[in-house]
Image (spheres, rainbow, N blue to C red):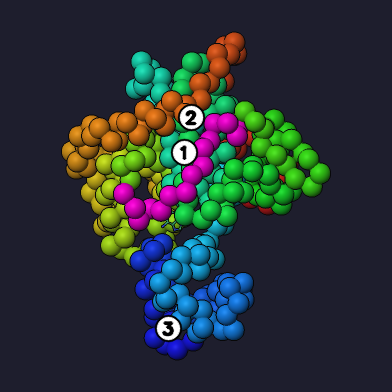
Amino acid sequence: MTPDQFNFLRAFLKEHSGLVLGEDKRYLLDSRLNPVAKQFNHASLSDMVVALKRPGAQKLSDAIIEAMTINESFFFRDMTPFDNFRNIMLPHMLKERATSRKLRIWSAAASTGQEGYSLAIELLEQKSKMSGWRTEILGTDLSTEALAKARAGAYTQFEVQRGMPSNLLMKYFKQQGAEWMVAPAVKSMVTYKPFNLLKEFRSLGQFDIVFCRNVLIYFDRETKADILQRMAKQMAPDGYLVLGAAETIIGLSDAYKMVPGVRGLYQRSADKAAIPAKAKTTAAASDRWKAKKATAIPAVKPRTARPLRAVASSSRTNLFAKNR
Ligand SMILES: C[S@@+](CC[C@H](N)C(=O)[O-])C[C@H]1O[C@@H](n2cnc3c(N)ncnc32)[C@H](O)[C@@H]1O
């Protein structure tokens, strides 16, 4: 591959997926795209780039973008965001949405589904407090292969050992041969759909909580700032944003304020993010979405309320702790 072709591929990826590859990442292109070249019967990456430049190369283009996505994920990743979800975000929403009893959550780089299912499990663990609530978890990702796995909800022993506490594994998964299947009650709470974060967000409607973790790290400053700014417009005025451990809004967006003392958790700053006028398209999309997917949490017999701390991660049995 010539330097021009390398630069063409870098520009192509940045434009279509946001991925920014440094000059030193040529090895990554080689290792990930050689199999694509082979699959499309090109003798070399050079030949593949020539083909990519021809009109009508959509399938090749999609395959290249797909091959470059990094889908690393695991259940209850980094744990703290899920502790914050349980101990800060949910109590806030339970209080503030007590009348509407509706909650919309977006897992904005859902990958293979572990984040969305972890959130669903957290909600089910709180169901005694959420009787009659309608909750929606939308998981979106650029990678259709990752989403297919998310929808299947089938994970290997290794994948469940990476983060799923054993008591929750027993409660919300069923072993089938070598795989662990997410229970239907969990699966039905999450919808996965393809979506590129570089595209317009309005069709997705408004969210109360957005998990956008471990994806902005792959983008340049301008792209991160743009995504964060547009995301704020899709959030409720008191909506929460959760970023990955290596990500921040600092220096990128003034549309959020940090939740004091809580690293990686932000709340929309109502004055800075322009609240979208209840545009018909947004409302209509949101209504369609609600009609299609809202999961009513069934009324349950109230059980002895556990103090919030009592369900914190540290108190969970986790036979797999050494793997986390
Ligand atoms: C490292 S995974 C993070 C998964 C999960 N959020 C977590 O923290 O475990 C990053 C995901 O971002 C997705 N991604 C990359 N670029 C994207 C884009 N432009 N739009 C939507 N998703 C994208 C990738 O396909 C990948 O599944």
Left or right of 183: which side holds 308?
left
Is 275 located above or below residue 144 in the figure? above
Quadrant position of residue 180: top right
Extent of the magenta region: 186-200
Crowding around mark 3 (Cα neighbors within 10 Å: few <14, some 14 to 19, many 20+) is some
Nearer to us in this view, 290 or 251: 290
Q: Residue at x 41, y 76 (%)?
A: 53
Left or right of 140: which side holds 145?
right
Q: Which residue is label 3 attached to? A: 5
Left or right of 209: which side holds 222?
left
Helix, strand or loop at disc 2? Answer: helix
Crowding around mark 2 (Cα neighbors within 10 Å: few <14, some 14 to 19, many 20+) is some
Residue 36 lies, in percent from the top left, at 58, 72
Q: Which residue is label 1 attached to? A: 138
Helix, strand or loop at disc 1? Answer: strand
Residue 79 lies, in percent from the top left, at 54, 44
Q: Amino acid at mark 3?
A: Gln
Whichever of callouts 2 and 3 sits on the residue coming sooner in the sequence is 3
Nearer to us in this view, 162 or 319: 162
Spot the residue most to the bottom: 2
Residue 186 lies, in percent from the top left, at 60, 32
Spot the residue most to the right: 177
